Amino acid sequence: MLVLDVHWMSERGITFGYQTDINGLEEENKFLRESVANLERELEKFKRPPLILCEIRDVMGGQAIVRLPNGNEFMVEVSEQCKKLSPRDTVLAEQKNLTVVKKLDSVRKFEADKFIIIEKPTISWKSVGGLAHQEREIKEVIELPLTKPALFKKIGIEPPKGILLYGPPGTGKTLLAKAVAASTKSTFIEVVGSELVQKFIGEGAKLVKEIFQIARERAPSIIFIDEIDAIASVRVDVGTSGEREVQRTFMQLLAEIDGFDPLDNVKIIGCTNRKDILDPAIVRPGRLDRLIHVDLPGEEARSEIFSIHAKKMKKGRLNKKKLIRAMEGFSGAEIKAVVTEAGYFAIRENRTQVKQEDFLEAIEKVKQEVSTEGQDYLKMFG
């Protein structure tokens, strides 16, 4: 019978696989211990009660007045680790007794951030075509008070707080607003009126208040309210809760407009396709009292708009007058669509030069699309 002397074999460098197995088991055991520790930490998180987000309204000695998200206010204690508090700070508090336990040092966030677009436009006045009259008016009302406020004080007049741009869709109302924001180096805050109408009571009014607060903090700024008729239409007998919410939002908008000086670095531009349904309160003197009509472009304006959009194109010999006449009744947006479609026709044939036929074909295509959209609209609302 063969008897192995393990000690003798180990002295001569002969080992068994069981040593390797022990090392592997130790590594696996270490990994499992770490996994268990991680799971225990995660379990502690699940057991820990959640903290509630509050706003500091005032600080009095070792106590603070906090405002909860539902609007209720309480006098609460402040933990030793959270003593340096100021009004409007955002803090975390225990849910049971509302003791303040932590101050959030992140930048204050607004609920309105979800509903607005904030940008610094780079569109120059050279990109705006066929709107010379509207351009002059918007410069007088928006640009001059922001760039030369001292001039108005010397003359002794107060400029309008805002303007209303009205007219058919696609005529350049948003383009005008962005161009004046760029020329004055203002923050451009764009909001759609229908987004302000919230299903929760008081939410729309709260959003309006926050939008104006953001505008003041980022001044000089321009608040551009598209589809303003969604909240500023003629008031009717208040019936449903939804109608009451619209009225509250509208009243808050009027209050915010009335609440700042005409020479503040905040201007308002309202935009609508339905001026006829607006409440007279929004366009009375002292509010959006400068009304600027942005209509469909005439022949000269269409030519100017076409030249702007087709400037970078490689074009063949064109009968420009024929093209401009063929686009009668087109808006600025539709003229831009014609130029884009003409470029696609050239690309499909692997050409780098756009011909007269491409533009004519593009005009017919855009006409058909506009006609189809009109028929669909009549089917839905006619």
Image (spheres, rainbow, N blue to C red):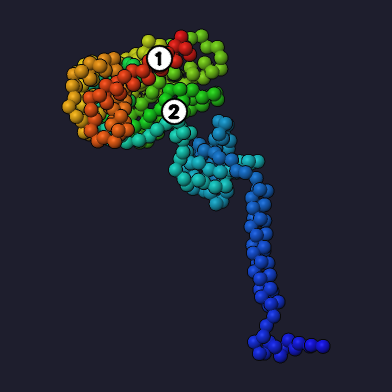
Which quadrant holds the N terminus? Answer: bottom right
Left or right: residue 344 compared with residue 243: left
Left or right: residue 136 compared with residue 119: left
How far is disc 2 from disc 1 in space, using C-alphas?
37 Å
Disc on the earlier residue, 2 or 1: 2
Residue 86's x, y, as percent? 47, 42
Name the residue at 35% across, 15% down: 283
| Residue 143 in view (yes/no) | no
Q: Which mark is residue 374?
A: 1
Q: Secondary structure at mark 1?
A: helix
| Residue 246 in view (yes/no) | yes
Instruction: Give the foreground label among 2 and 1.
Output: 1
Task: Categorize mark 2 by other alpha carbons within 10 Å: few (<14), some (14-19), many (20+).
Answer: some
Single out the residue that lies furthest toward the front. 349
Q: Amino acid at mark 1?
A: Gly
Determine whether 339 is above or below 25 in the image.
above
Task: Categorize mark 1 by other alpha carbons within 10 Å: few (<14), some (14-19), many (20+).
Answer: few
* Viewer-side residue, 260 vs 300: 300
Residue 352 image-quadrant placement = top left
Residue with the mark numbered 2: 209
Name the residue at 79% across, 88% down: 2
Residue 159's x, y, as percent? 26, 21
